[in-house]
Amino acid sequence: MRTTGTVRTTAGTSTPGRTFVAALAVGALALGATACGGGDGKKDTPSTSATRTTSASGVQLPRLDGENIEVAAVWTGAEQANFVKVLKEFEKRTGATVTFVPAQDPIVNFLGTKIAGGSPPDVAMLPQVGAIQQAVAKKWAKPAGPEAKAQLTANYSKVWQDLGAVDGTQYGVYFKAANKSLVWYNTKVFDNAGATPPTTWKNFLSTADTISASGVTPVSVGGADGWTLTDWFENVYLSQAGPEKYDQLAKHAIKWTDPSVKDALTTLAQLFGKPNLIAGGTDGALQTEFPASVTQTFTGGDHPKAGMVFEGDFASVNIAETSAKVGTDAKAFPFPAVGDKAPVVTGGDAAVALKDTKGAQALLTWLASTDAAKIAAGSGGFISPNKALDFGAYPNDVQRGIAKALVAAGDNVRFDMSDQAPQSFGGTPGKGEWKDLQDFLKNPSDVAGTQSKLEADAAAAFKN
């Protein structure tokens, strides 16, 4: 999800992020889980040492009085505003001034322009594994320092550390993660239709028919944002083809013309090929951006435009912009199993230093800390890969359950497929996989043609 905006940490406003994959059992998701205690209830109180501040949880930060730090990210709206809260606390503890630099997709292109102009930000929040690799290949990224790496060692599973490493050197600090295998539903619509959350794809389609018969269009699709369609594909493919095939396709070790891709697209066509099941039909979906796909599911009283919408935990940020309450009016169920197991697709944003300065390294250290994660978690619409964070930091049982599932995945996490690909294929509006799947949504009967376009675009991107 990519929008634009402007904010400084001393003002502040702005919305949502991107993607990866963990093969978890459905039961691990525990969306209705109760709060997990364990916190000591103490507030972190930083010292005012002239050289370094230390919180109760152990993160040490240098004094940076008078230093200006810029951090670039594609976040806008509520998501940006919540990140600004984290930056403001960093300012308070260090004396630095932090400016949020609004970026655009693809962020690598945005950063390239800034660097060519001689004004790179100190830190960039990169939403794709491929983007980190590109930043390293272009010699933009600076290795994380010992303090940041110490926080990662203390607070993160090895897989999350590896996500931010290239050829054994640590560059990225994964601050934000996302569980992108959720279907959010309007509880009133389900109650009125007599529907219950489905656990299989077959039941998902029959539930959609039940909701349609009750007078409400069942599914909202944000097709104007191509990345949402990659998430639809990835969930179906992971569950149907399995993790081994998934890993092969992610690396382009098998072609997009593989029969397993045909099977996944054919499965998706069972929904995409029925415009009456999609809010606004095909044309409407292709004109609906992600935020609107969520809000239209939870507005309109007894007659919303849709009964359910697929996407990650961050959709709760958009739900909060309506009168619906997460946990009562809005609930979530795991993406239904297409094969033997339900998928769990997770994504994240990593902080990478583009300047080897004291301020940039301090910000990486801060973002890897439990203190920073606690602030972000309390704002809602945020999941941290930080395993040391008390689940009680999350604002409701739904978010706590989603976070528990992510942490429980441990080192079984796999990357979101489009995030592993070169950005020209997996992360650019109007190009590559995003555009090819938008074309597929428009014409879901052309499975073979879609495979051919995907393969041609993937081959070109991976070659370069």
Image: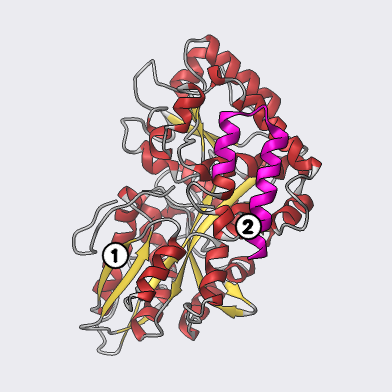
In front of the other: 172 or 329: 172
Where does residue 299 sit, x and y in percent of width and height? 35, 25
Name the quadrant containing residue 53.
bottom left
Quadrant containing the C terminus in the rendered view: bottom right
> Vertical placement of 93 versus 280: above or below?
below
Crowd tier of the residue under label 1, counting other residues whose Cα lies within 10 Å: few below 14, some 14–19, many 20 or above:
many
Q: Is residue 39 visible?
A: yes
Q: Are marks 1 and 2 in contact (CB under 8 Å)?
A: no
| Magenta segment boundaries in residue numbering | 435-464
Secondary structure mostly seen in magenta is helix
Residue topped by disc 1 = 100
Mark 1 or mark 2: name the one nearer the start of the chain: 1
Where does residue 381 sit, x and y in percent of width and height? 41, 48
Q: Is residue 414 visible?
A: no
Where does residue 437 sit, x and y in percent of width and height? 59, 39
Secondary structure category for the residue under label 1: strand
In front of the other: 268 or 67: 268
> Vertical placement of 359 versus 228: above or below?
below
* Residue 331 lies in the magenta-colored region: no
Residue drawn at point x = 51 percent, y = 58 percent = 348
Residue drawn at point x = 58 percent, y = 49 percent = 432
Residue topped by disc 2 = 415
